[in-house]
Amino acid sequence: MELSATGNPVVTHADSQVRVGIDIEVGTLLLAKDDTDLAVHQAVVEFAAPEQLPWTAQEVRFAGKGPDGKSAGLTVDLLNDAWDGPRDGLPDAIWTVVALAATAAGDVGIRYAPPTS
């Protein structure tokens, strides 16, 4: 494969976002919205740190299977309508998923160094 690159990428902290995906054991989380059930098997939590503020979970996207066995998804906004705090009334299981994703992102012990040439 021929590939070239120029520049030196820099991540800005002005509007940093990180998405953390976690696998969820099938059968341990069932979401229901508008009379539709979703047996969750994966979640992707989006964290953001806008304008150098502390990291905040802003959204979680769930993937799973509906009662008909077909793949389905559900997105949950975690911030209130004013975007200044957590959304009230979300089930504790949603916040457990967020905590699991945050733990996975920070505590899995990944240490990475690019390969040396």
Image (cartoon, rainbow, N blue to C red):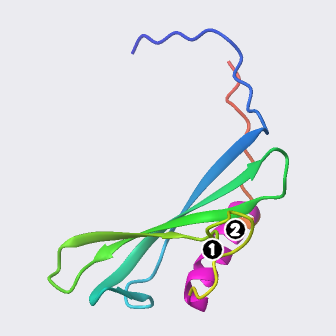
Q: Is residue 70 magenta?
A: no
Amino acid at dot 1: Val
Report the magenta stretch's main SS.
helix
Q: How many labels, in total?
A: 2
Quadrant hosting residue 62: bottom left
- Residue at the location (69% across, 74% down)? 86
Which numbered dot is residue 98?
Answer: 1
Q: Is residue 116 above or below residue 43?
A: above
Residue 74 versus residue 97: which sits nearer the camera?
Answer: 74
> Where's residue 27, x and y in %?
38, 90
The alpha-carbon separation of the residues under discs 2 and 1 comes to 6 Å
Residue occupying the far front of the picture: 82
Residue 61 versus residue 3: which sits nearer the camera?
Answer: 61
Label 2 sits on residue: 102
Pointers 2 and 1 in contact (C-beta within 8 Å): yes
Residue occupying the far left of the picture: 68
Q: In the picture, which quadrant includes the N terminus?
A: top left
> Where's residue 36, x and y in %?
27, 86
Amino acid at dot 2: Ala
Question: Residues in magenta?
Answer: 91-106
- Residue at the location (74% across, 26% down)? 10
> Where's residue 40, x and y in %?
38, 79
| Circle 1 Cα neighbour tier, 10 Å, few/some/many (<14 / 14–19 / ≥20) | many
Q: Is residue 48 above or below residue 101?
A: above
Q: Is residue 34 above or below residue 74?
A: below
Residue 41 versus residue 16: which sits nearer the camera?
Answer: 16
Quadrant hosting residue 64: bottom left
SS assignment at label 1? helix
Residue 1 versus residue 26: which sits nearer the camera?
Answer: 26
> Where's residue 105, x and y in %?
69, 61
